[in-house]
Image (spheres, rainbow, N blue to C red):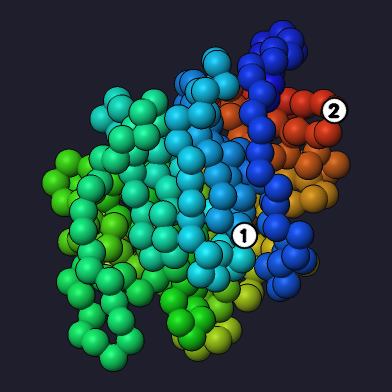
Amino acid sequence: MCGVDLDNGLLTKLCSVDLPDLPSDEGGHFGPPAWRLHANMRGTYCAIVADRGRDGLVVETSSGRVTMILGGGDYYQETVPFSACFVCNEGRDVFVHRSAWNRLDAADPATGNSLTERHIAPYEAGDKRPRHYLDYFHGQLCPSPDGSRILDDGWVWHPVSVPRVWSATNWLHLNPWESEDGTSVVDLALRDDWNTPSCWIDEHRVVMWGLVDEEPEESGKRPGLQVSDVRSNDRTLDEQWAVDMEHAPLKLFSDGNLVFIFDEKGVIIWDMTSHSRLTTLPDFPAHLYDANRRTLVAIGDTSVAELSLSCLYP
């Protein structure tokens, strides 16, 4: 594992870890399992997890010490990324991860100690559903910029995508069942597919790719951006902006005023004030937006490239 100093381009080896073998199956419609790296803001801890798989671990980057061994369960795990993210909530680093198809837990990444201990009775078919039991397949997780909320791009039978948001602050400090059925839970849409690009605009608004139609089987197929205020359950207040793109993008990022739409060919920069394409940056397959440096970062097999966006800001 290595780190790159973007100021001087120097590469530093941090540590090395041994990873288990990934399953050899093709993965079907959702693709084969693949490793993904998550890190906290300071870079002191990282998680290496198997998207569309069940395994993962958390590592202290300065030493290579493994602080947590993760198991996400093996019930339709091939349909979703391994639910995982780091959250900085009220100044504290927290690691959120899937421990079963329908359960998330939060832990101290330094020790692995649980921060959301709770009991939910097992559910047997034909029995009454236990209190707090959640019939929901957790998907990709995305914390809000201030760490107060989490966006979960998961699904329910039959199947249909139901992206949802809840309060991480309530979950960590008030109610350990908040991620199941807490008062802060907001369902953002019924969509035809999950694993679609989305990101936070600010602490209260989320932008998702794909426009939602009245008929659920068509929702999310038309190219465009849907903006939702997560403080309200009233979806009639959502904004929808059509975007002319042939294929769905790979990722979305936002600085609060602009949306950066990444695909394999380059970047489209969308202006949320004028609801129009501001500019296109072809031939720069960016992977990250650095909000502090106001740059786009592309990560290749043997190189890292950074592109300044200072010309877009006064």
Above/below status of 75 relative to 15 = below
User: Which residue is located at x 79 percent, y 50 percent?
Assistant: 264
| Three-letter residue code for mark 2 | Thr
Above/below status of 222 relative to 152 = below
Q: Write down the residue under mark 1.
A: 52
Residue 210 seen in this snapshot: no
On-image quarter of the N terminus? top right
Q: Is residue 245 left or right of residue 205?
A: right
Q: Is residue 304 left or right of residue 191?
A: right
Q: Write down the residue under mark 2.
A: 302
Q: Residue 16: x percent and y percent?
A: 66, 24
Q: How crowded is mark 2: few (under 14 residues within 10 Å), some or many (20 or more)?
A: few
User: Which residue is located at x 16 percent, y 51 percent?
Assistant: 175
Q: Is residue 199 left or right of residue 303?
A: left
Q: In which image quadrant can residue 8 be found?
A: top right
Above/below status of 72 relative to 113 = below
User: Which residue is located at x 56 percent, y 78 percent?
Assistant: 192
What secondary structure is marked by label 1? Answer: loop
On-image quarter of the C terminus? top right
| Three-letter residue code for mark 1 | Arg
Q: In which image quadrant can residue 172 be found?
A: top left
What secondary structure is marked by label 2? Answer: loop
Nearer the viewer's eye, disc 2 or disc 1? Answer: 1
Q: Residues within 10 Å of mark 1 (few under 14, many from 20)?
A: many
Q: Residue 230: x percent and y percent?
A: 32, 57
